[in-house]
Amino acid sequence: MTGLKSGDQGAMAALYDRYSSVVYAVALRVLGDTGAAEDVLQEVFLQLWRKPTAFDAARGSLGSWLAVITRNRAIDSLRKRRRETDIEDVVLSVAPDLAGDADRARTAEKVRGVMGTMIAAQRSALEMAYWEGMSHSEIADKTGEPLGTVKTRIRSGLIALRKAFQS
Amino acid sequence: MSEHEQYADDLVLYALDALRGENRARVDAHLATCAACRLELEQLRGDTSLLALSAAGPRPPQRARQRLLDAVAREASEVPTFAQQTRKDGAALPRDLHASVRSWWGWMGWAATVAVVVFALSLWRENSALQQSLMSLSSQAAKNARELEELRRIAAPILGPETQRVTLVSTKAAPQPQGKAFYLRNRNSLVFLANNMPALPPRKAYELWLIPVSGAPIPAGTFKPDAHGSASVVNPVLPAAIEAKAFAITMEDETGATAPTMPILMMGAGE
């Protein structure tokens, strides 16, 4: 990141080589289209190039931060809505540092394990909210469940993930 | 967190980047003053990042890497970074100028010493002036914060769900939809209140538009009226310091639009 802040294009290439697979996987999972996923990939890394100070290394890892930024951008693109969050406003904490493919594979496996322990309705609500960008009320309409139940399922699902990685 | 429980669900939506319009503005206002909720939001974002990291798939094609690096090189050549600019400035001194600078220091050292003292004195004066400016700015910032808090205190009960809203009209006329926009351009602040708004079809929302003096209409938030036809939009995200010629309302899909869909349902210019 230091190299990036001084305008080092080689540093940008190194960051791309390290994190592009995460960014592309997230964008592709949301959009389901390789062309659109490439566009989001390009946008996310260009934003990092233009504003490297937006990422605060003291709060979370770069891989996790990029994953969150990418997911948000991809959902904006999927739902054809305008952006409301600047990248420097996205601060996250308590996320593992996942520089290598092996770290990411272990994390992904653990997340899938936690998701597997959830009841189907909770897993489904969490996935609709996260990967499809659906609001609570949209999920409630789709599933026929009360709004409060949907809210509780999503929130407790996220907390369950947090606890699994804290233990 | 118990006293902040009312924000718990909204924070989850915020972390999922799914909170929009006035609900987002309300949470933003709370986050500005609540460290506990800011921390909870950061943790929720951390939780969501775990979901993101569970995505697996193929690596991006090689052409994507080249496309990015070409774009980076293009931007670097068009807009030099601060570091590049600094390096260029240093390298721009011609060789003979370096020589003459060394020579000047050689036999005019005493003059340089005087110059340094004078420079230090001017820096000291400038520092004092800057400190005074800083104190003045701090005082202004505190005043602005007090004014904002006062506005919040006044606006909160007006915009609350429990507020009784009464519109007085001619007894012979049917209630007409009505909207009031309060726009402070220098503070980028907009409050919009509406009443008697007709109910919307499913998955539709009203969208407020700022019509600038020149250029295309700017989206200024979507809203859905409550059972009584009342609605509000508070501090939507807007470009800085745009002069508004008028405000307008259209009906759009509930996710909002980037350009208004005709017809314009309501419109009003400044009073």
Image (spheres, rainbow, N blue to C red):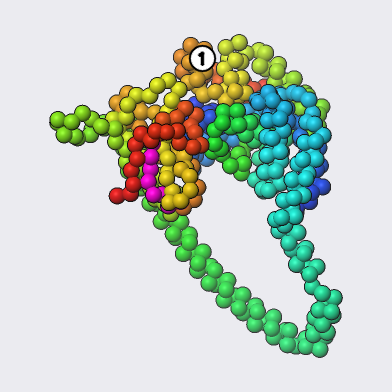
**Image position of B116 (left or right of A128):** right
One can see residue B223 in this view:
no
Judge by depth and name the residue closer to the eye, A79 or B44. Answer: A79
| Secondary structure mainly formed by the magenta segment | strand
Residue B41 place in picture, x, y as percent: 56, 34
Residue A67 place in picture, x, y as percent: 68, 32
Residue A68 place in picture, x, y as percent: 65, 33
**Image position of A64 (left or right of B180):** right
Total numbered badges shown on the rendered structure = 1
Q: Secondary structure at mark 1?
A: helix
Image vertical order of residue B77 relative to residue A61, above or below: below
Residue A42 place in picture, x, y as percent: 71, 38
Residue at screen point 63% across, 31% down: A74
Q: Is residue B243 magenta?
A: yes
Q: Is residue B77 magenta?
A: no
Judge by depth and name the residue closer to the eye, B15 or B83. Answer: B83
**Image position of B135 (left or right of B125):** left
Q: Quadrant of residue B105?
A: bottom right
One can see residue B205 in this view:
yes
Q: Quadrant of residue B166?
A: top left
Image vertical order of residue B80 relative to residue A48, above or below: below
Residue type pointed to by label 1: Lys
User: Few, some or many C-alpha atoms within 10 Å of disc 1 (few <14, some 14-19, many ≥20)?
Assistant: few
Per the rendered image, the range of residues in magenta is B242-249
Residue at screen point 34% across, 47% down: B269
Give the chain letter at badge 1: A
Q: Which residue is mark 1?
A: A142
Residue at screen point 60% across, 78% down: B122
Residue at screen point 80% across, 36% down: B63
